[in-house]
Image: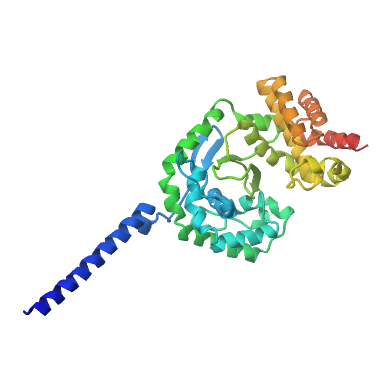
Amino acid sequence: MNRYHVLKQFYFIRIWIVLCLCFIFVACSDDSTIDNANDDPIQTTAAISKMIGRLEICIDPRIELINVVENVKSYKEKQLHEPTMQQETSNYFLPYKNHPAVEMMQELKMMGFTYTKPRWFILGYTNLPELMQLYPLKQTYFYNDWSPDEAKLAEFTQKLKDFYNDTKFGTFYHKHQTDYERLLDVVSADFEKRDYVKLLEDYFGEKKDKYVFIYSPTSPGGFGLWIETERKVTVYSIMFSGYVPLVLHEFGHSFVNPITDGFREEVDRYQNLFLPIQQDLPSYYDSWFIVANEHIIRAFTARVTAMLDGEDAGKRALDNEVSNGFKYIIPIYERLKEYEANKDKYPDFHSFFPRIIELFAELSS
């Protein structure tokens, strides 16, 4: 073998070694970014949950997914000196802010798919990544105020599945399972002190079939909703913290809103109460009906605060609500005392609600 052939063989051996090293580097680099990227545990990503009496406390990946898709465009990259789940989530998903699912979410938001509606929507589906529809969407409450294009929502569902797979959402969720479990333990501590399900049912004189508090470290706010099927009513409180009064506030929507719906014509009669306070309220409280519900629920939360922590604490809660723009809350708070003192006459909140309507009439005149 002459020198030329030796050099030629040596050259090809060098190329083969370089190619092997590149392959190893890519594989290692990919693994350092996401554990087991080629073996993403996407078969099922279920909620992490625990039971305290009749209250289920959980972190639900469906809610985390919809939060990310809804808000990723506003995320900013942060230095992880003291990482939190919000920071971890922001850094991980920021590169996907122009994903088709995110773009379609923006389109749907322009059509009214905002606030509670995306959460109602996603809870009507099975676990990720299957997202199989559990029941007709028209059974969910948000259809009372919004009539979306169901074909668009079906398309959006497929894009959510694509987002799940393209971002390896399952790997991210499973990688942080220990962190989620630790957070769940922290927010669960206060709920072990009292039976808050009994408190809600005793106060409103009504029972629900299932109570779920979804703690969501990525939630942009608090949301209260319920899903009613032929067999049962499940109520949800979705919060970014475990602060009990706010959790009860969100659960309160599941009791109060259906009652105000039943008195919709009477409540709407006092629309003139909205204009004097509209400028003092956040823009998303954009109708008297919504604001009426908020007044009642916030007055209820202040009453619970007074019952649990003393009248002074209740008055501090009231002052805070007045400063937030809820100017009618003090007379509603006082009227709720009448309800509490006359449970023989008013066995449930529905039977008392005409007294709330009478109060609106008094305030209106």
Q: Quadrant of the C terminus?
A: top right
Q: Nearer the viewer, residue 83 or 149?
A: 83
Residue at the image position 88 percent from the left and 43 percent from the top:
272
Q: Nearer the viewer, residue 21 or 57?
A: 21
Q: Is residue 314 above or below residue 256?
A: above
Residue at the image position 55 percent from the left and 45 percent from the top:
218
Image coords of residue 152 (percent x, y): 63, 65
Image coords of residue 328 (percent x, y): 82, 34
Residue at the image position 77 percent from the left and 32 percent from the top:
322
Image coords of residue 305 (percent x, y): 68, 26
Q: Nearer the viewer, residue 24 or 107?
A: 24
Q: Is residue 157 visible?
A: no
Toward which corner of the image does residue 226 lie, by quadrant?
Answer: top right
Image coords of residue 346 (percent x, y): 79, 30
Residue furthest to the left in view is 1
Total labels: the figure holds 0
With 39 as the anchor, is 111 left or right in this view?
A: right
Residue furthest to the right in view is 365
With 234 as the anchor, is 10 left or right in this view?
A: left
Q: How is the image coloured?
A: rainbow
Toward which corner of the image does residue 334 lie, by quadrant?
Answer: top right
Residue furthest to the front in view is 3
Toward which corner of the image does residue 253 lie, by quadrant?
Answer: top right
Q: Is residue 135 visible?
A: yes
Q: Is residue 302 above or below residue 143?
A: above
Q: Quadrant of the N terminus?
A: bottom left
With 247 as the anchor, is 18 left or right in this view?
A: left
Q: Is residue 74 above or below residue 201?
A: below
